[in-house]
Amino acid sequence: MSDAIVIENVSKWYGDTQVLFDCSARIAKGEVVVVCGPSGSGKSTLIKCVNALEPIQQGRITVAGHTLPAPASTLPGIRARVGMVFQHFELFPHMNVLQNLMFAQLKVLKRAPDAARDKAMGYLQRVGLLAFADKFPGQLSGGQQQRVAIARALCMDPECMLFDEPTSALDPEMVNEVLDVMTGLAAEGMTMVCVTHEMGFARKVAHRVIFMDAGRIFDDCSSSDFFTNAGTRSERAGKFLSSVIK
Amino acid sequence: MNYDWNWLVFLQATIDGGSRYAWWMLSGFGLTVLIALAAWVLALALGVGLGVARTLPSVALRVPVVLYVEVFRNIPLLVQLFFWYYIAPVLLLPATLQEAVNAAHPVLVQTLTAILCLGLFTAARVCEQVRAGIEAQPRGRFNAAHALGLTRYQAYRHVILPMAFRVVLPPLTSEFLNVFKNTAAVLAIGLLELTARSRQVGEFTGHIFEAFIVATALYFIVAQVVGHAMRRLELRLALPGHTGGSDA
Amino acid sequence: MNYAFDWSVIPQALPFLAQGMALSLALLAVSLVGGLALGIVLALMRLSSNRWLAGIAGAYVSVFRSIPLVLAIFWFYLLVPMVISAVRGQATPIGPMYSAFAAFVAFEAAYFCEVIRAGIQSIPRGQTSAAQALGLTRMQAMRHVILPQALRVVTPLILSKAIIIFQDTSLVYVISVSDFLGAATKIGQRDSRLIELYLFAGTVYFLMCFAASRFVEHRTSKKVIA
C-alpha cells in the first residue's frame, strides 16, 4: 500500500514557543485517520502543516507527491491537490454556492466553465444540496454550509482530504448530516485525516486513531485497538477518552 | 531641478524691514494654535451639552439639537465662514453693532469670526460623537443607576458620562486635529494663519519650497504630539480589565 | 436688519452656477475613483511584508493625514505644473483645475487607505486560509476573496466620506477654481449680490448633502436588517 501522506520528525515553533515536538506518522492511500486529543494539543496545527498553510521549521512532510518545506511559488499547486474543510466552513460570503464551488476550478485548475459547472452540480447533488446552487452562504444553515464546503473541496479532485474539526461549530442536530457525507466519502476510498471530537465517527469509520497531547503524538494505532485498550496503552489517552465519551 | 535651496532665508529680514521671515512663520503658527484652541473650547462646551441633550427623553430638547447638527454638518465649512463674515453682520446685527464691527480692527474681527465659525461647526460633530458614546453604554447601566435612586442628572454625571468619555476620547482627539487642520480654511477671509504665512513667505522670498516644507513639518509635528499625548491619556484612564471603550 | 434682498440675479445666473456644480461633482467623482484606487494600493503596501513598501505607504498616509487639505491644494498647485513641464520638456501653462484633481486624489487616498486596511483586517483569517487551501495564490486570494468583502464592509464609511468630500470641494476657492462656490462668488461679486448668492449656495449644499446623508443612512440600515 502506498503512502498518501508521510510526516517525518516534524517540529514547529511560533516565535520562541514550540508547538509541535518531533511528530511522525504515515497515512496510506484510502486510510481514514482520526487525530484527537485535548485542546491545545497541536492537532489543528499539525493538520495545517500538511497542506502548508502553516510552515514547519524541522522535519519533512510528503504529500500529493511533493515534499514540504517547499518554495512558496509551488505551494498553491500543492494545495490544489489537497482538500481542506474548516471548522467555520469558510465559504466565500460574497459568492453564491455555485460560484463558491466553481471559483477555484476556474482560477486554479483553469477548467472550462462548462466542465466546472458540471462537476460542481455533481458534487452538490452528492451532498444533497442541488436546490441551493444559487443561494448565498448567509441563507444556509451551518450544516448546509459545511456540506457545501466539503463539495467545494471535492470539486478540485483532491488526492486526500483534511478535516479540521468539521462539526465543532455545528448545532448538535446538524452534526449527523455532515458526518454522513464524510462516512460516504470514506466508503469510496478517499484518504482522509480528520481532527475531530466525534468519537462515534472515529469508532465506526476510522481505520486509525492518532492521539496527541501537548504537541506530541502519544499514540498511533488501529481504531479498534484505541477504543478498547486506550486506558492501558497510555494514561493520557485513557483520561482523554473518558472525558470525551459520556 | 534647478531650484536654489536656501534654508537660511527664514533668518533674513523681511521686505518691509519690520522683522524676520521666521517670525512671520511663527506668528502664523501662533495664530493657528490660538484659533484652534479657542474654537475647540467653544466646540467642546457646546458640543457636550448638545450631545447630552440629544439623548434626553424631552422632544423639546432633542429636535433643536437635531436641526442644529443637520444644518452645521451639511454645509461646507467655507460657506459657513463666509456666512459669519459677510452675511451675519448685515442680517443679524442691529445698525449700531454693525458700525462697531466695521470700525474695529479687521484682524480682530476676522479672528473672532473664525473662532465662532470653527467652534460652531465642530460642536455639531462633537455632539454626534458624545451622543454615540452615551448610546454605546449598555441599557443596564442606566437601569442600575436609576434602581439605586439616582436622579437623571446624577446618573449622567457619575455613571454614564465618565464611561462615555473613555469611549469618546479617540474620536474627540481626531476631531481636535481636524479643528487644527480646518484653521487653514480661514485664510479665505484674509487671516494670516500658518498656511497663509507660508505662502506669503514663499512669494516674498521666492523660496516657496522651504516655506511649504516648514509649514508641513509643523502640522505633522503637532499631529504626532497630539496623537502621542492622547495615547498616554488613554493608558492613564484605562480601567483594569477593559481593553478599550467597548464593554465586555 | 436693513438689507434689501434682490433674488432676481439667481435665475439668470443658473447656467453658470450649474457649470460650477458640474465641476464640483466631477471633482467628487475623480476623488472617489482615484482616491479609492490609490487607497487600495497604499493599503496593500502597508499590509505587505516588505518593510520598504510598508514604510513608504505609512509615511505617505501619516503626512497627508496631518496636513490641511488647503495646504495639499497649494502644494499640488505648485508641483503639478512643474512636473508636467519637466515631463514634457518645456514650460507648460496649465490651469489650476488639474492641480485640484491631483490634490484631492492624493489627499483622500490617505484616508481611504486606512479605511480599506481596517476593512481587510476585519475579514476573518479563515477566509484567507480557505482560499489558499484551494490553491489560490496570495494575490488571487486578496483580489477575489478578501478585497471584495472588505470593500463591502467599509461601503458605509466610503459613502459618508463622499458627502464630506463634496463639501470639501468648495476649498478649491483658494486657488480660484470655478466650482459651485467659486461660481457663486463670481456672480455675487459681479452683481454686488454676495449675500443672496452665498445664501443660495449654502441652501443648495445643505439640500444636496442632507438628502445624500438620509439616503446613505437608509441604505446602510437596510443592510443590517438583511
Image (cartoon, rainbow, N blue to C red):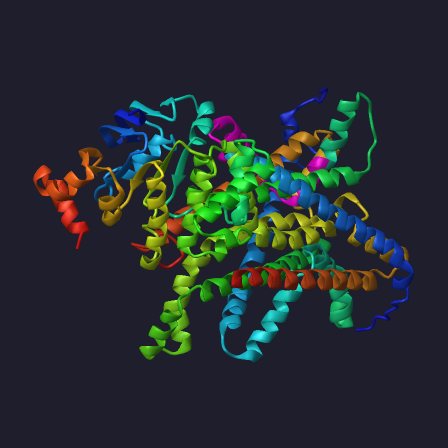
Q: Residue at x 82, y 34 (%)?
A: C94
Residue B124 in which image quadrant: bottom right
Q: What stretch is highlighted in magenta?
A: C47-76
Q: Where is residue B19 in the image (x, y as percent from the top left)?
A: 67, 37
Residue B185 appears in the figure = yes
Residue A69, compared with residue B196, is above or below; it is above
User: What secondary structure do most residues of the magenta stretch adopt?
Assistant: helix
For the N terminus of chain A, give its image quadrant.
Answer: top left
Q: Which of A100 and C222 is in front in this view?
A: A100
Q: Which image quadrant for residue B83?
A: bottom right
Picture coordinates of residue B96, whole percent (x, y): 76, 71
| A212 relative to A134, above or below | above
B83 sits left or right of A95 in the view? right
- Left or right: residue A13 versus residue B122 is left
Q: Residue at x 61, y 55 (%)?
A: C160
Q: Residue furthest left?
A: A232
- Residue C19 within the magenta-colored segment of the rendering: no
Q: Is residue C60 magenta?
A: yes
